[in-house]
Amino acid sequence: MGKQIWKPGNMLYPLPAVMVSAGDREGNANILTVAWTGTVCTNPPMVYISVRPERYSYHMIEESGEFVINLTTEKLARAADYCGVRSGRDVDKWKECGLTKKKASTLKYAPAVEEAPVNIECRVVRIEKLGSHHMFLAEVTAVQAEEAYLDERGRLDLNRTGLIAYSHGEYLGLGRKIGTFGYSVRKKSAEPQRDRRQRGKIKRGKQTISGKKRKH
Ligand SMILES: Cc1cc2nc3c(=O)[nH]c(=O)nc-3n(C[C@H](O)[C@H](O)[C@H](O)COP(=O)(O)O)c2cc1C
């Protein structure tokens, strides 16, 4: 079987399906779901979201220059889908999804979604009018992390929150852990190596013993 060559299209998956919250100067706030999003720089921390100008949220983000990326979990999957198929022009998505507005620590207009385990507060630095979507390039101004997911050393156990991915039209749980960053080149921990050496010794020992036995 070969591969079919298709015309250019969007086939980069999996992606997050985040809930982006925004607000305007009149005090209205809305949520839309965004999959065209990502991290673009570590220092300064920068992200992007790409939004169609016809979305109700677009002008909120454009005018306020602010938005919050709220990470989505299995518990929030239904709300994330709803916020991606209904417009704030017609419904109050906060109310319909039972979501709570939380004050962002560094932003004036965009509220965060309280129920999300992590809220990434963003200030727009550039708008790139790419075509169907305009890309809001933004600097991260603060991150709010749910304390329930912090370990005793204060580190966020993000993968315990039940994060979801969006792939080719489907929402998926993240499944089992396969490795950790750099595991392909990392030396095995001392303990298993000792175990292996120990096993080798035992094997050699047995061979020696059996050799001796054979001698007898
Ligand atoms: C999983 C998913 C991903 C989406 N990703 C995007 C996106 O990246 N950019 C975008 O403009 N719209 C995206 N949408 C569509 C908007 O979320 C949708 O049109 C929403 O109703 C807009 O809300 P608003 O009119 O209240 O702003 C996505 C929808 C879903 C369900």
Image (cartoon, rainbow, N blue to C red):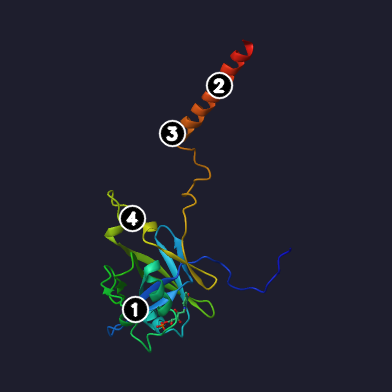
Instruction: Name the mark nearer the viewer: 2 or 1.
Output: 2
What distance separates the C-alpha of mark 2 from that of mark 3? 22 Å
Residue under numbered circle 4: 156
Mark 4 residue type: Leu
Residue under numbered circle 3: 191
Which of the image's four quarters has the C terminus?
Answer: top right
Q: In which quarter of the image is ligand 1?
A: bottom left
What distance separates the C-alpha of mark 3 from that of mark 4? 27 Å
Instruction: Name the mark nearer the viewer: 4 or 2.
Output: 2
In the drawing, what numbered circle is on residue 206?
2
Check mark 1 vs ligand 1: CB closer than 8 Å? yes or no: no
> Badge 1: few (under 14), some or many (20 or more) residues near its Cα, within 10 Å?
some
Q: Most extreme residue toward the top, as rendered?
A: 216
Up the image or down, 86 lies above or below 212; here it is below
Note whether residue 26 is visible: yes
Give the image quarter of residue 121. bottom left
The image shows residue 106 at horizontal and vertical percentages of 28, 68
Residue under numbered circle 1: 97
- Residue drawn at (28%, 59%) of the image: 148
Nearer-N-terminus badge (2/1) = 1
Instruction: Name the mark nearer the viewer: 2 or 3.
Output: 2
